[in-house]
Image: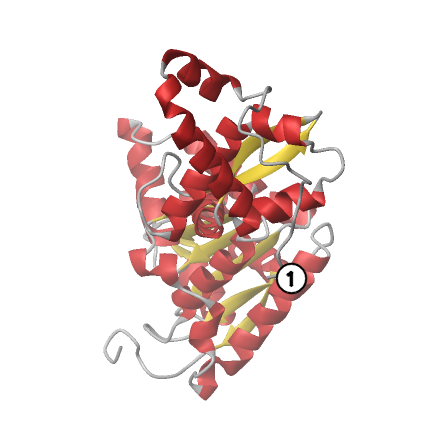
Amino acid sequence: MPNVEPFNFQNNRGTQNIGKSFQDILKKRPQMRNEYEKIRQIMLEDAEIKNFIQEHQPDLSEAIFNRDLATIYEYYLQNKKQQDGLPDVHPGYDPELLFVDKRVVIQYRASQKMQKQHEKLRAASKIMAIGMPKQLKSATMNDFKSMDSGMTAAVLAVSEFIEDYVDRPQEFHQGAYLQGPYGVGKTYLMGAMANQLSFDDIDVLLLHYPTLATNMKDAISDHSIDTKTVRSDMKLVDILVLDDIGAESDGSGWIRDDVLSVVLDYRMQNGLATFFTSNFSMKQLEEEHFTLTKNGAEPVKAARIMQRIKYLAKEIPVNGQNRRLNP
């Protein structure tokens, strides 16, 4: 780096305008003047400080430099500690010198590492999950770069959905109904999608549907959860994922009629993206699950709810190796 001469200083040891902190020290301990001059010289020779002075010429005068030397020295010390890997007064924040209204001031900005941590926390706050496996927290779309051919259509559809939704969030985007056997990666793909969308400030609710159904029925007697709040969250969230639909126990059809039907009707009317995973095909879900209750066959109610599901999501068969048995 070239030798920058920011000031035309005369080597005047009797500087009149000294920073208040140093001035107070020198008044009480005159013997510290030599130390003060050493500090001052170190500051003038530091490459980053020299560049800062040069950038703010001619406004940053010698008098201002001397007056604000204590601030500049704080910057120098904290910056050096960070460079040397030593603890500093504001861990995770980088010191920065600013020249504002004829004064040198220091501010601390979140470091790149801290910004990434904040971004992860913010993204995590955009995802709500009930009854979902913990490993979904680390799921990424990159995990599907090497995938079974039976997952290709699903991964491509989800990738296209993410791109389209982020570009045009106000439009209706049809979700997906991922149908296939246990363990092929349907739920994991939904977790990866949720994590990707969360970084664009998109709220996602991941629900293991059998767990939700059990909790909702239990809440009738023990009030363990606020069913109205859960229903409201399901209706209003940007992206809703209902995982393992068809595995819930709903002999009376109450969950089907008073929870799922109400939620899906609202989301259909308001164009809100909705995803499903299931071991059943749509045809099986209607005929072998929704139609049959302890009160007998209810094909009309089953057909009505399937109309909503088909509007909200495109059926995509998936297949492949069982990842749970062969991780």
Instruction: Please tell me which residue is depicted at 47% across the width and 73% down the height of the picture.
Output: 142
Q: The residue under label 1 is which amino acid type?
A: Gln
Q: How many marks?
A: 1
Residue at the image position 37 percent from the left and 61 percent from the top: 138
Residue 304 at what x, y percent from top left? 58, 54
Residue 246 point in image, percent of width and height? 39, 60
Residue 221, quarter of the rendered image: top left
Q: Residue at x 47, y 42 (%)?
A: 42
Q: Quadrant of the N terminus?
A: bottom right
- Residue 262 drawn above or below residue 172: above
Mark 1 is surrounded, within 10 Å at the Cα level, by few (under 14), some (14 to 19) or many (20 or more) other residues, namely some
Residue 220, percent from left and from top: 33, 31
The residue beneath circle 1 is 174
Q: Quadrant of the C terminus?
A: bottom left
The quarter of the picture where residue 161 lies is bottom right
- Indicate the position of residue 105 as horizontal and vertical percent values: 58, 29
Query: Which element is circle 1 on?
Result: loop
Residue 28 versus residue 263 in the image, above or below: above
Q: Is residue 68 left or right of residue 326?
A: right
